[in-house]
Amino acid sequence: MDFLGSIVFLCLFSMGFCQESMNINHLDPDLLPRPLIIEFSESRLKNMSDDIAIHCTSWRVAVEANNLSPWKTIPKECADYVKDYMLGRSYNVDLEKVSKESGIYAKSLQLKGDGMDAWVFDIDETLISNLPYYSDHGYGSEFFNNVQFDKWILEGAAPAIKPSLKLYEEVLSLGLKIILLTGRNENKRNVTITNLKHAGYHKWDKLILRQNDREKSAAAFKSEKRKEITEEGFRILGNSGDQWSDLVGTSMATRSFKLSNPMYHIP
């Protein structure tokens, strides 16, 4: 076969192959085996989960920044997120960061030496943890039940928040007076003292609880008590609490430290 004949043969062969391909393409596709493709793939489900995590992280940051209006329960879709946060490493790391920064500040203070320099601590979710209770109540996804929570308090079994215990011991060793200011009722004084000592807190200068003034907001109550403390001559150099109502208002500390708590909000 000469050169020209070879070219003609190749052209005819190519045309025939293309025609065969066209015939196959026109066949009923149901006659051919095909892979099954599902649109809602694992990657999409993962993205949906990621969207919830991003939403709940944004919500938690807004809580810690005090950017939300008063709220009564965490968003239902964030129940698993809050659970994972509270039981995971992130919550402990956040607590350790607050304790470390608080300790650095405390050590930088120049005390007057007259025994009137003070540090105020909240109790619940600041010195001791009610996480065992909230683990049985949806990590904040259920409406708060005073009766059930009082039963838990009366057990006196709340464990220490270890980074806070470390800070408490540092503040004590520096010579600052420790004042405990809590929203617990006065009738819980004895069980609170027992629980604190069992958790490792053995010394403080004042333990202030609520009387029959539940109509007052926590912020108003704690502002009033801080005012009384300063009128006694104490200088509140530091204040630690898990709620903004522990820290804001009047007669505020020279510097305040907010511990993380996305489970509940007390105005």
Image (tube, grey):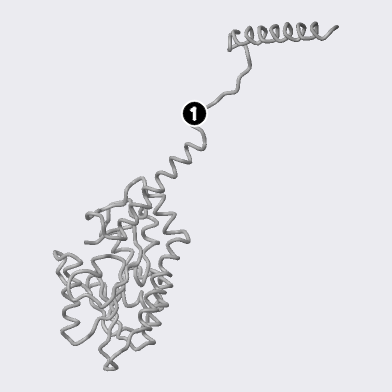
Q: Is residue 186 above or below residue 36?
A: below
Q: Is residue 76 above or below residue 154?
A: above
Given the current orientation, which residue lies at the most extreme right position?
1
Give the quadrant of the C terminus.
bottom left
Q: Which residue is tagged 1?
A: 39
Quarter of the image for residue 19 reads: top right
Residue 171 screen position, x and y as percent: 36, 83
Residues 45 and 19: in front is 19
Given the current orientation, which residue lies at the most extreme bottom position?
114
Number of numbered tags placed on the structure image: 1
Residue at 52 percent of width and 27 percent of height: 38
36 lies left or right of 16: left
Residue at 18 percent of width and 69 percent of height: 249
184 lies left or right of 1: left
Residue at 25 percent of width and 89 percent of height: 116
Residues 17 and 53: in front is 17
Give the quadrant of the N terminus.
top right
Residue 7 screen position, x and y as percent: 77, 9
245 lies left or right of 212: right
Residue 124 screen position, x and y as percent: 32, 68
Q: Is residue 220 above or below residue 48?
A: below
Q: Is residue 111 above or below residue 11?
A: below
Badge 1 amino acid = Glu
Q: Give the secondary structure at mark 1.
A: loop
Residue at 41 percent of width and 51 percent of height: 81
Circle 1: is it few (<14), some (14-19), or many (20+) Cα within 10 Å? Answer: few
Residue 100 screen position, x and y as percent: 42, 74
